[in-house]
Amino acid sequence: MSDSEATVEDPTMHQDIGTSLLVKPDGSNEAVTTTEQLAPERKSDLGSGKVNTEGRVTKHSPYKMKQSSPYKLLDARMNALVDQLRQKLAQQDARISSLEKNNSYIMRHLGEVDDRLDYFESDTEETENINEKVKAEIRCSKMGEDETDQRDERGKDKKKGQ
């Protein structure tokens, strides 16, 4: 392979075969075999049927806890996962904040639209009332014209009849 051709390794490639990718605090990646991460006392417990709980209690008590290499790797992996979760939570918080801003903007404009619709509805009712009054006036004036026309015709008939 020439110098210009570099192989790129997929970080998830080792996860299926019993290894996982560990992100160290300094930012470098390290593949760690998960089957070899058992503490020595746990490996010995696997072969025998008894469990040494007394030794574990004193060894893992808060005052005397010393992390062995496998536990340091596990702790680093857990810290990396916690950091990823914190990043995702921060992204979710940013999205929620943005959605809340958009929601308040929409609600404010919906309030304005509601006020305009109320005003339009009252104007429409007022216009309908005016239209009804105008129609009533038109009917009255037509009735008055009809009565006037009938009187005029009666007056003409009386004059002709005399």
Image (spheres, grey):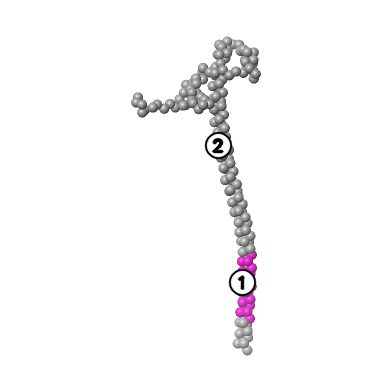
In the displayed image of the protein, which residue is found farthest to the front?
26
Circle 2 — which element? helix
Write the start and end of the magenta stretch as one range: 129-151
Determine which residue is flagged by label 1.
138
Q: Residue sitting at 62 percent across and 61 percent down? A: 123
**Residue 46 visible within the image:** no
Q: Give left or right: position of 4 versus 75.
A: left
In the rendered image, the quadrant that contains the C terminus is bottom right
Alpha-carbon neighbours of circle 2 within 10 Å: few (<14), some, or many (≥20)? few
Chain-order first, disc 2 or disc 1: 2
User: Which amino acid, by three-letter code, is at mark 2?
Assistant: Gln
Local SS, label 1: helix
User: Residue 151: image x %, image y %?
Assistant: 63, 81
- Nearest the viewer among 159 and 51 is 51
Of tags 2 and 1, which is closer to the observer?
2
Residue 46: image location, x then y, percent:
56, 13
134 in magenta: yes
* Horizontal side, residue 25 vs residue 152: left or right: left
The kind of residue tagged 1 is: Ile
Query: Mark 2 = which residue?
Result: 91
148 lies left or right of 23 = right
Instruction: Looking at the picture, tell me which residue is in the foreground, 25 or 111.
Output: 25
Viewer-side residue, 27 vs 161: 27
Report the front residue among 55 and 3. Answer: 3
Tell me which secondary structure the magenta stretch mostly adopts: helix
Seen in the picture, residue 155 relative to 138 is either above or below; the reply is below
Q: Quadrant of residue 94?
A: top right
Residue at horizontal 48 percent and vertical 22 percent from the top: 31
Counting from the top left corner in percent of width and height, residue 19 is at 49, 21
Can you say which quadrant of the picture contains the N terminus?
top left
**Residues under numbered marks 2 and 1 in contact, where contact means CB atoms less than 8 Å apart:** no
Which dot marks residue 2? none
